[in-house]
Every structure is written in C-alpha cells, then in structure tokens.
C-alpha cells in the first residue's frame, strides 16, 4: 500500500498527470479514498512554489542559451494563446477557473506559468492555484468514486 501511495504522489507531482492521474491511480489500487485525496492534493500543491522559484530564479539564468530560450518562448506563446484572454481579463478568477478544469494542460504547471507571464502577484496566484487544484481534485475524486461504485 505504501508503494501505491508513493506512486500516486509522484503522479501528482508530475507534469504529465498531476492529481488528475494520481487520485484515480491510488483509488483503483486500493489506497484509502480519503488518504489518496489528501496526499495527491498536497503533492500537487507543492508544485507551485517550486515552479515560481524556477521561473523567477533559474529561468532568467537559462534564457542565455538559444535552445532553452526558443523552447521557453514556445511554451510562453502556447500559455498566452490557450488561456491568455481569460486570465488577463479576469485575473485571479480566470486563473482559478483555468487551473480547476481537470483536463490535460490546465493544472498547476500551466497555472504557474500563466501567473508568471501575466504578472499576477504571488499570493493571489498561490491562492488561485490552491483553490483551483482543490476543486479539480474534488471533481476527479468524485468522478473516480462514482465510476468505482458503478463498476461494482
């Protein structure tokens, strides 16, 4: 069981899944449904400070290299096109709704990048990401729970 909790937590930290994958993984592998929610939510929440540190400190340094700069500009353009109008227009609420949608590419990684690009203050961005991740996790947890009940 500890192995499944660790794997669910790693999925929740991963940019390839976040809590949207960690929660169902843990639930389908027999982890307590409440424990998996808390662990995956907190693991996914840890990503925000790490991303902000990376964007503010390390990103600035890495922009000196052409390959990295080209890749960073590509990601920045995609973030602005995908969510830019709504986040720019609605700020905190737009960011919260963007992070809340449980679809690929709309989690805390993209939310952190969008907050950085649009200059949303760190506390507001953290609150929006935190609430958005929580609501997204609730949606995924409830959907997974209902699916498991329907399968049995």
Image (tube, grey):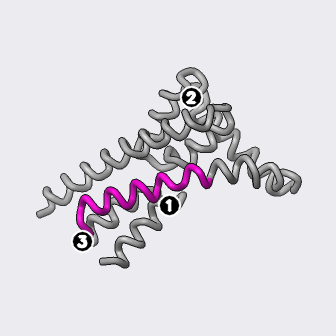
Crowding around mark 1 (Cα neighbors within 10 Å: few <14, some 14 to 19, many 20+) is: many
Residue under the point 48% across and 52% down: 45
Q: Picture coordinates of residue 149 (x, y %)?
A: 14, 58
Q: Picture coordinates of residue 6 (x, y %)?
A: 41, 72
Q: Is residue 92 magenta?
A: no
Residue under the point 34% across and 77% down: 2
Q: Label 1 belongs to which residue? A: 13
| Secondary structure beneath label 3 | loop
Picture layout, residue 130 above or below residue 53: above
Task: Please state which of the two labelled residues, at mark 1 or mark 2, is closer to the viewer.
Answer: 1
Of the numbered discs 3 and 1, the one sitting upstream in the chain is 1
Instruction: Look at the magenta stretch and give its main secondary structure.
Output: helix
Residue that sits furthest to the front in the current view: 123
Mark 3 vs 1: CB contact within 8 A: no
CA–CA distance in space, label 1 to label 2: 24 Å
Residue under the point 25% across and 50% down: 143
| Secondary structure beneath label 1 | helix
In this rendering, position of residue 70 left or right of residue 117: right
Mark number displayed over residue 87: 2
Q: Quadrant of residue 101?
A: top left
Q: Is residue 45 magenta?
A: yes
Q: Which residues are magenta?
A: 30-50
């Amino acid at each position: 069981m500890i192995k499944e909790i660790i794997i669910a937590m790693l999925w929740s930290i991963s940019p390839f899944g976040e809590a949207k994958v960690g929660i169902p993984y843990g639930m389908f592998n027999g982890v307590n449904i409440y424990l998996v929610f808390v662990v995956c939510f907190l693991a996914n929440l840890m990503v925000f400070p790490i991303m902000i540190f990376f964007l503010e400190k390390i990103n600035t340094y890495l922009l000196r290299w052409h390959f990295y700069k080209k890749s960073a500009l590509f990601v920045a353009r995609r973030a602005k096109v995908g969510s830019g109008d709504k986040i720019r227009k609605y700020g905190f609420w737009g960011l919260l709704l963007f992070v809340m949608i449980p679809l690929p590419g709309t989690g805390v990684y993209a939310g952190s990048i969008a907050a950085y690009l649009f200059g949303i203050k760190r506390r507001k961005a953290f609150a929006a990401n935190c609430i958005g991740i929580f609501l997204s996790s609730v949606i995924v947890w409830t959907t997974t729970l209902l699916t498991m009940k329907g399968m049995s």
